[in-house]
Amino acid sequence: MAAGGLAFIAAALLSLIRLRQVRWGTVRDALFLVGLAVLFVIQLVQGAEVVAHPDNPGAVNTIAILVIVCFLIGVGRSWELIGGPSFGITHEVTELVRSHESEPADQDKPA
């Protein structure tokens, strides 16, 4: 099973190298795949640690955090693939503050 995941990542990296096009999108995809391989290896090592020492909560916590991070990255990439609107947390917080500042002061006073 582990070899299958690493083989998939290696094949994807080889296909990017085969294209021989150095663009930001290709570099970004390559970095994503390398990061994916690193996360996979970390999860594999931590999984072996859980098997060797089942009473070690640190390894389980590391795996749980990595799963959540991978889930959030997957949701973001899926949103990008379906063409969802692009927004950032900084932009949203700025708009929230601006809309709160533009409200009249009379709304805060009781009638």
Image (cartoon, grey):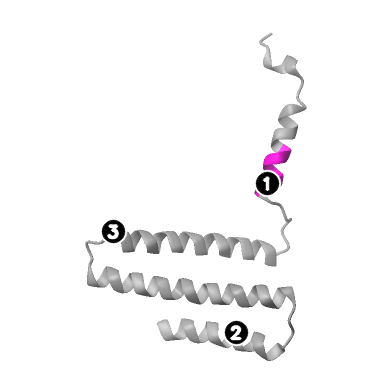
- Image quarter in which the N terminus is found: bottom left
Does the rendering let one see residue 78? yes
Judged left or right of residue 35, residue 63 is: left
Q: Secondary structure at mark 1?
A: helix
Q: Residue furthest bottom?
A: 18
Neighbor class of circle 1 (other Cα within 10 Å; few <14, some 14-19, many 20+) is few
Give, as a three-letter code, the residue at label 1: Thr
Range of magenta residues: 89-95
**Tag 1 residue:** 90
Q: Position of residue 87 (x, y in %)?
A: 71, 52
Of mark 2 and mark 1, the one earlier in the sequence is 2
Does the rendering let one see residue 1? no
Tell whether position 17 is magenta.
no
Residue found at x 74% / y 32%:
99
Q: CA distance from mark 3 to mark 1?
A: 34 Å
- Image quarter in which the C terminus is found: top right
- Tags 3 and 1 in contact by the CB under 8 Å rule? no
Residue found at x 55% / y 76%:
34
Give, as a three-letter code, the residue at label 2: Leu
- Tags 2 and 1 in contact by the CB under 8 Å rule? no
Of mark 3 and mark 2, the one earlier in the sequence is 2
Disc number for residue 57: 3
Judged left or right of residue 32, residue 48 is: left
Q: CA distance from mark 2 to mark 1?
A: 32 Å
Q: Nearer the viewer, residue 79 or 98?
A: 98
Instruction: Give the quadrant of residue 52.
Output: bottom left
Instruction: Give the quadrant of residue 65.
Output: bottom left
Give, as a three-letter code, the residue at label 3: Pro
Q: Which secondary structure dominates the residues rendered in magenta?
A: helix
Q: Secondary structure at mark 2?
A: helix
- Tags 3 and 2 in contact by the CB under 8 Å rule? no
**Tag 2 residue:** 13
